[in-house]
Amino acid sequence: MEQSNLLQKIIVPVLTLILIFVLFIIYFGSMHSVKTDTVTFPIAKPRIDPFKNLQLSAKAAMVWDVKEQKVLFEQKSDMVLPLASLAKVMLAVTAADTAPAYTSVAIKKEFLEEEGDTGLFVDEKWKLKDLLDFSLTTSSNDGSRAIASVIGATKTGSQDIEASRRDFVNLMNEKAKEGISHKNHPYP
């Protein structure tokens, strides 16, 4: 009984400390180090710059670290460029005010341009919020056409795709005349 008690009180904690010490030595022994007169300091391995060999076709670019509030990468970031599509921004605001984010948008052949690949396929179903994000990010005319057609048809009850788009454009114009409201949208 005394041996069991001795094992629990002394030997197990000593073995645990030895194991921790060995793991500590293995960990710090694998790091590069700098030796001064009295102390050895581990140094961090060099960081790889992910932007070093980056080749872009864009005229200008910037990557902003929102947490640290600093620029991580920039290429001609002071270049003045025209807005990609102000109409798509108005489309997004109008769609967000008109229909819930979970509204289903089915992609029809009539929404897609014949030339080019925009990443959309016939008979796909998208949530409105996801299609808005996609359309704004990629500046997709096909995505915008699908949103205008489906939301226009939902709002007016029209089955005519061209009429639905015209109705949606009218909604956009009304929104522009009244000014963009400052209410919080469930999605941008």
Image (cartoon, rainbow, N blue to C red):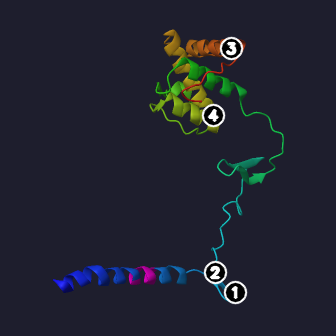
**Kind of residue indicated by mark 1:** Thr
Res 78 label: none
Count of numbered tags: 4
Q: Mark 4 and mark 2 in contact? Answer it, CB < 8 Å.
A: no
The spot of residue 146 in percent (x, y) is 55, 25
Q: Does dot 1 land on a helix, a strand or a loop?
A: loop
What is the distance, in whole Å, between disc 4 and disc 2 at their CAs?
49 Å
The residue depicted at 61 percent of the width and 81 percent of the height is 32
Q: Is residue 38 above or below residue 9?
A: below
Counting residues from the N terminus, which is met first, the one under dot 3 or under dot 1? 1
Residue 19 colored in magenta in the image: yes
Residue picked out by circle 3: 173
Residue picked out by circle 1: 36
Seen as rendered, the residue at the extreme bottom is 37
Pick the residue in front: 107 or 10: 10
**Kind of residue indicated by mark 4:** Leu
Q: Nearer the viewer, mark 1 or mark 4?
A: 1
Counting residues from the N terminus, which is met first, the one under dot 4 or under dot 2? 2
- Residue 49 makes an appearance in the image: yes
The spot of residue 99 in percent (x, y) is 52, 20
What is the distance, in whole Å, between disc 3 and disc 4 at their CAs?
19 Å
Which range is magenta?
Answer: 18-23
**Kind of residue indicated by mark 3:** Asn
The spot of residue 39 in percent (x, y) is 64, 85
Q: Answer few, some or many: residues within 10 Å of disc 4's Cα (few below 14, many 20 plus, some between 14 and 19).
A: some
Res 136 label: 4
Residue picked out by circle 2: 41
Q: Is residue 73 left or right of residue 119?
A: right
Q: Mark 1 and mark 4 in contact? Answer it, CB < 8 Å.
A: no
What is the distance, in whole Å, between disc 1 and disc 2 at their CAs?
8 Å
Q: Choose top left, top right, bottom left or bottom right for residue 8.
A: bottom left
